[in-house]
Amino acid sequence: MKAEIIIATYNAENRIGRTLDSLSRMAQHTALEEGDWRIVVVNNNSSDRTREVVESYKDKLPLEILDCPAPGKSKAQNMAVERIKADLVIFSDDDVEVAPDWMDKIVACAHQCRDFDVFSGFIKGHWEEELDPDFRSWIPVGSTYALHDEDMVSGPCDPGKVWGPNMALRRSVFDAGLRFDERIGPTPEKLYAMGGETDLARRAAAKGFKSYFIAEAVVNHLVKKETVNEEWIVKRAERLGYGIFVDGKDNYPRKMPDFVPVFLEVLFFFCFWACLYPLTFLMRRSKRKFWSRWKFYYYRGLIKGYQEFL
């Protein structure tokens, strides 16, 4: 088998149909023959009709459904990894729409770029509601919503640009013993560490597996309307901070001299922004107000993550 697509899903009855419809259109255009590829959907303990919706596509797609009762996207992905049959494993999400030539572009690039083992396709945004112009100018839109910059071109890339909605790895990466870190990634809990796929790509890079960006392999990633507001964005900062210390202290960008203990540095900045935070309720809407709130939540996440993981 040349390729398989893995999608972990949770309570997605109202969105995964759009993803499967796009995969059905892709199936009509792919150059891969029957038996050369398949889709594995891992139902991650959904409490809605997600499984029934996925089952309804079995007559349209080479589809296998797994049930992972343990909550957590990384756990669901690892369950699928233990059952992979293909040389190339492609990962996506339950809230994307893939281009008709998406899989073919990834397979072709993997065939041509033999020196690379980790691949990132291009992620565009499908906005349910447009982002406020002020926020768009204030925040890093790409990393906030896992959307790539429009000017990115195909070529070797930093593993930090390998994001979950559109990524692929050779089987050799998993044969080397690498797996998704099950402490990272979405769970039903409100606070969780972000970036499980990027973490895997970075650990793969540390073992010598190089990353490549494929601008021609495109997915449209749904940006839900409930996420295009300040409250959601600053809470995302807390999740970002929470996951920094999962693999130790090296991912934390130091601002003080090395002789200052990391925890004291984090505590200092948390206290600083915590003291300023009440004042943000008196401030007019502005970039300064937004970033003051963002940094308070970020350092709050860092404190919780330090206590949890170190």
Image: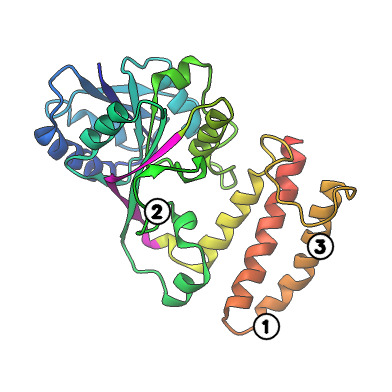
Amino acid type, label 1: Leu
- At horizontal 55% and vertical 55% (from top left) the residue drawn is 236
Label located before the other in sequence (3 or 2): 2
Q: Is residue 150 above or below residue 212?
A: below
Q: Which residues are magenta?
A: 211-225
How many numbered dots are placed on residues in this image? 3
Task: Return the residue found at the far left.
Answer: 28
Residue under numbered circle 1: 282
Amino acid type, callout 3: Cys
Judged left or right of residue 138, residue 305 is: right
Residue 114 percent coordinates (x, y): 36, 25
Q: Which residue is mark 2?
A: 148
Q: Main secondary structure of the magenta part?
A: strand
Report crowding for label 3: few under 14, some 14 to 19, many 20 or more residues within 10 A (C-alpha). Answer: some
CA separation in Å, label 3 and label 1: 19 Å
Q: Which residue is mark 3?
A: 271
Q: Is residue 114 left or right of residue 194?
A: left
- Give the spatial CA distance, label 2 vs label 1: 35 Å
- Observer-side mark, 3 or 1, equals 3
